[in-house]
Image (spheres, rainbow, N blue to C red):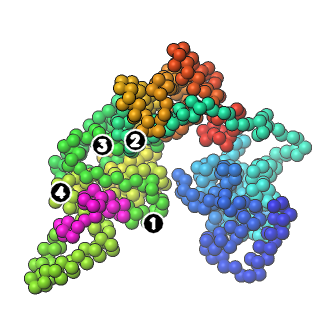
Amino acid sequence: MNIDQAKEKFDQIYVELMDENVPLDTEQDARFQVIDRILVEVLGWDRSGIRTEPHTDSGYVDYLLTAGNRNRLVVEAKRTSRLLIDTHQPRMAWYKVNGPALQSATDGLEQAKRYCTDTAVLFSALTTGLQWIGFWAVRTDGVPPKEGKAAVFPSLEAIQKNFAVFYDLFSQEGVLTNLYQVHVHQSEGLQINHSEVLESVIEISERRLLSKSGLLRDLENIYRSFFSSMSGEDDPDMLAKCFVESKESRAADESLEKITRNLLNQIDIVNSDRGTELEDQIRVSVESQRGDFILIIGNKGAGKSTFIDRFFRLVLDKQLRENCLTLRVDLANSDGNQVTIANWLTDKLKIELEKNLFKDGYPTYDELQGVFFQEYRRWSNGEYKYLYEKDKITFKQKFGEWMADIALNQPQKYVRRLIENAAHARRLMPCIVFDNTDHFPQTFQESVFQYAQSIYRECFSFIICPITDRTIWQLSKSGPLQSYEHRGFYLPVPSTKEVIAKRVNFIKEKAKGNAELNGNYFTDKGIRLSIPNITAFAFSVEDIFINEDYISRIVGWLSNFDIRRSLQIVQRVITSPIIDIGELVKAYAIEQRFRPQRINIKKALLFGDYNHFNQQDSSFILNL
C-alpha cells in the first residue's frame, strides 16, 4: 500500500462514518468501528502483527503494533466521549505536551509513556478513533517528553486535510523509517536537510549468522540443562547444589536493605544457607496453632521462588515437613484479570487441596462426610432427624446433593472446609504459597494479598507470598500492608559470579567420580558429550566468567542483577561462535592453557551469533 491508496481508503471510511450513523458510544465501539479499520486498512499494519491487551509491568496495552518481530508503536484507545483536546481549534496543529491544549490528555499520555517504556517503543498514539494525538514518549535527543510537541488531529476532517502528516506519523511505512522524528523536530524548530544522505556504517546485507561447530552446538545442551534452569523442579539435586547461599554480611544491596528496614518495623535477613528463620516460624506456628503470614521480599530475579521450593523440599526439618500440607499456586499461569482473580485462586486451591488430601485426587463420599461432619450431625439430629431414622439411604443421597452443591456453587466455602479439615482432622498445617505475584501490576498484587489474608484470618494456615522490594515500598505507603498483620524476610540478590560458580561446580562434581554412573546422569539430560569434554566445558566457563571479575560484573550490570537475565547474557557469550568455546574445550583436552582475549568476550556479548552488532538480536544493548 502507498499513501495514495491509503488516502482513498480513508476517504471511504470517512464517508461511511459520516453517512451511516455508526454507533461509537463505548471504547469498544470506537476500537471495532474506527481504530481497527484505520490501523489495518489505512495505515498498512499487518493484522498478524497487532497485539491487543498484552500485559506489561504498567498494565494492559490497548494495541501493541509489531513488525519484523520488534515492537514498533503503542496505541492507547479511549471512548469517543472522552475529552482529549482542550482547544476548539478545528485544524491539525502541534501543541506542547504539558501545555494548556492537552491538559485533558495528560493521564492518557502518561499511560502511553509507561507502556512505551515497558515495551521499548519510542512513539505512541492516543486516540478516541475520531481524535488522534501523536506523542514521542521515549526521546533520545535530550528533550524531556513533556517539553516536546505532540501532533494533534482534533477530528477526522483534520486528518483528511493533513493526511500526508497523519500517514507519516502512524503508518507502518512511516514508523519503520522514524518519520515521526522528522516531523517533531520540524515542529520544534529544528530543520533537517532532506538532501543529506544518512548511511549506516555497516549495511544490513553485511550482517550474517556465523556458523557453529558441531561441538559448540552440543555444548549448548549443557547450558540449557544446567545454566538456564532456575527451578530445578525435575532435579532436586541441582536445586540444592546450585542455590547460592548468602550470609547476612554480604548478600544484600545496602541501599535497598536500608529502605526495606525503614519501611517495616520488623524484618529479618534470610540466612539462605539453612533458612532457619523460616523454619523457626513454621515450628512456632505448628506448636501454637495460630498460623502466620509471611512475605519473602527481594528483587525480581533474586530467586524467591527457588528459595521457597528448596526450603520445603530439602531444608525444612523432616518431622516438620511431615506436619505440613504444602500447596503452591503459581500466579504466572493466571490471565492477570484482577476482576476474576479471586475465583481463579479458589479454583486452583481446590485442585491442589483435593490432589494432596485424597488418594485419587478427589474425595469419596465418606471423606466428604468427614469434611462436612458438623453439618451431617446437625441434619441427623435436627432438621432431618426423622428422615435419618426412617431411611438412611435417602438421607445420605440428600446430604450428598447438598455437598455437591456447596463444592460447585460455593467453592470458597468448600476450599475453607478442606483447609480446616487438613488442620483439625488430619493435624496438618496448610502451607499455602502464592507464587509469582510480582509478575503483575501493584493493584493485581493487592487483590492477591487481600485474598491470601482472608484465608489467613478465617483458617489456621501458614501463608507465604513472594513480593518485590519495589512493591512492598508502594504497598507500605498506601495499601493493605498498612492494615494486615504479616512478617517479612528479605532475600538478598547473589552476585552473578556466585550464581555461575555454583552451576560450574555442580557440573564438575557430576563429571568426576564414577564415570559410568555420572555419564548416565548427563545422558538422561539429553547430553551426549564425553565426560572429559563436559569437564573441559566447565573449566572454560570458569575461566571466562569466574576468574575474570570484570566480565561477571558487566553481566550483572547489564541484567540489573536479575539472575534469569544474567544467565541469558551468559548464554549469549558462551554460545557465540566469536569465542568458540569448542576451541577452549579442545585446548583443555590436550592439556594446553587457552583463554580468549577480553576483546573477543566483549564482541561475543555485543554480536552474539552474528559477525556484527544486530539490534534485532540483542535485548540488553541499545544502539544509540
Seen from the viewer's position, the closer of residues 390 and 412 is: 390
Q: Callout 2: few (<14), some (14-19), or many (20+) C-alpha neighbours within 10 Å?
A: some
Point 20% across, 57% down: residue: 423
Point 69% across, 36% down: residue: 209
Does the magenta segment cover residue 26?
no
Q: Residue furthest front?
A: 516
| Spatial separation of the CA atoms under disc 4 and disc 1 | 34 Å
In the image: residue 61, left or right of residue 417: right
Q: Callout 1: few (<14), some (14-19), or many (20+) C-alpha neighbours within 10 Å?
A: few
Q: Which mark identifies residue 232?
A: 2
Marks 1/2 in contact by CB < 8 Å: the verdict is no
Magenta part of the chain:
346-372
Residue that badge 4 annotates: 426
Q: Between tags 2 and 4, which lies in front?
A: 2
Tell me if I can see residue 101 in this picture.
Answer: no
Residue that badge 3 annotates: 313
| Spatial separation of the CA atoms under disc 3 and disc 2 | 11 Å
Of marks 1 and 3, which one's residue comes earlier in the chain?
3
The secondary structure type at the circle numbered 3 is helix
| Spatial separation of the CA atoms under disc 2 and disc 4 | 30 Å
Point 61% across, 74% down: residue: 26
Q: Amino acid at mark 2?
A: Gly
Q: Amino acid at mark 3?
A: Arg
| Spatial separation of the CA atoms under disc 3 and disc 4 | 21 Å
Query: Where residue 419 sits in the image (x, y, percent)?
Result: 25, 60
Marks 3/4 in contact by CB < 8 Å: the verdict is no
Of marks 3 and 4, which one's residue comes earlier in the chain?
3
Of marks 4 and 1, which one's residue comes earlier in the chain?
1
Query: Where residue 87 sits in the image (x, y, percent)?
Result: 73, 66
Residue that badge 1 annotates: 339
